[in-house]
Amino acid sequence: MTDIKPLIQDNTLLDPITEEKVSRFQTYLLEWFEREGRHDLPWKPQPHLSEKINLYRIWISEIMLQQTQVITVLPYFERFMAAFPTPEALAEASEDQVLKLWQGLGYYTRARNLHAASQQLVSQFQGVIPPDFDAIRSLKGIGDTTANAILAQGFNLPYAILDGNVRRVLSRIVGMTAPRKELDKRLIPISNLFLCRQNPADYTQAIMDFGATLCKLKPNCERCFMREACSAFQHKKVLEIPAKALKKSMPVESVAMLIFEEQDYLLLEKRPEKGIWGGLYSLPELIIKGRNSRSKNSPILANITLESIKNRESFTQFRHQFTHYTLEASIFRVSLSSLIELCPELEKALPQNLSLIPRDELLLLPKPKPIADLLTQYLKERNSGS
């Protein structure tokens, strides 16, 4: 075995890290991956594709897989590749086209950054991802872990990753008891220590697969091949490791969303790029109860209250859970003329972020999933004559 020194010692570890522990982990993990790993994922390099396209597909998958499970990503990845098979195709697409294909995946900043990064890639690197950390890291939306994953998966270079799955696996293997806020700082050198430098591509895929299938939040220890090498299991602390972040109270934001109708048209608002649902089409909204001081009405409704909008008709309600707050929305149907009475300037021209969209084109635009579901319900009821 290659001598790995110095081995890391840390007073928050349940057991010291030894060469035997590192070697056993790598051996067990790669043997399991050979038997049971996910070898058929569509973004795995394929011999009939060029290196350029294989690298591109790995990059797209890594962005999609951020905070999203493989089973959710698979159909999105296939549709995305069908629409944008090359970096050039993605760079030439409109932002609306990209966001429409991303609709439902959430964390839409990823899609906007991906689009911008594809344009960087084409203009600066002729569409070919280079085997250079700093160059990859310079692409918009790519952080250290994603850059390392591309280098390991795409070039078989010894770059360690530390995503959520890997954090959980390594914390349990070494018995890391540090609080959540200290985990990454302590685990980065450990992730480099455990990295199999002879086969980093298979190793990085294997440790992610292991975390996603066996060493989950609620782990399947009964089936796990790593129990003898796992400090958390040996010390009966699997459910306590890794330490969880302190729970914060989840604020609630209550809004009124308004379906402004004009014959066969609806008024939609393109949301600003920064913030929730950035760059997507939604309904103008009024804040009933904001989650913080930054909560604001849609610009067109800045000086309007719900009570001042006459002849509004209650349509439906929905509740949506974001990472950091809960959205409660009440939906109302209103004639566009009621809005124009309150904002006469709209009769001359609409602000740039507002568009009157024909009903038969509503579902073609990129929208947040709750709004897409809402408008689907609206169209169904309209078409049924209710």
Image: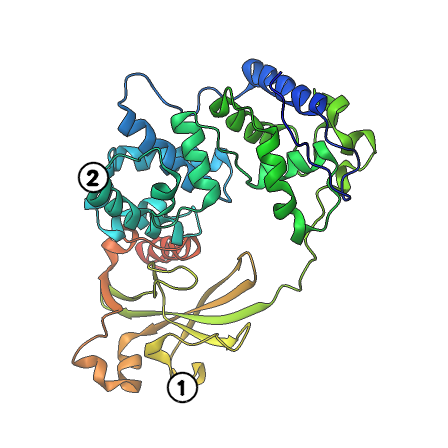
- State how far apart marks 1 and 2 are (Cα): 49 Å
Q: Position of residue 35 (x, y in %)?
A: 57, 13
Instruction: Tell me the element at label 2.
Output: helix
Looking at the rendered structure, the kind of residue marked 1 is: Ser
Q: Position of residue 325 (x, y in %)?
A: 56, 62
Q: Give the quadrant of residue 63.
A: top left
Residue in the foreground of this view, choosing between 327 and 166: 166
Residue in the foreground of this view, choosing between 169 and 297: 169
Quadrant in which the C terminus appears: bottom left
In the image, what residue occupies the spot 62% across and 47% down? 185
Query: Label 2: how many residues lie within 10 Å, few (<14), some (14-19) or many (20+)?
Result: some
**In this orientation, does residue 348 appear?**
yes
Q: Which mark is residue 308?
A: 1
Looking at the rendered structure, the kind of residue marked 2 is: Glu
Quadrant in which the N terminus appears: top right
Instruction: Tell me the element at label 1.
Output: helix
Depth check, mark 1 against mark 2: the one in front is: 2
In the rendered image, the vertical position of residue 363 relative to residue 136, given as above or below = below
Residue carrying label 2 = 88
Q: Position of residue 335 (x, y in %)?
A: 30, 74
Which color scheme did the rendering employ for the protein? rainbow
Query: Which tag, 1 or 2, sits closer to the chain's start?
Result: 2
Residue in the foreground of this view, choosing between 358 and 130: 130
In the image, what residue occupies the spot 28% across and 75% down? 336
**In this orientation, does residue 216 appear?**
no
In the rendered image, the vertical position of residue 285 relative to residue 153, given as above or below = below
Left or right: 115 as drawn, with respect to 292 = left
In the rendered image, the vertical position of residue 266 relative to residue 185, given as above or below = below
Q: Which mark is residue 237?
A: none
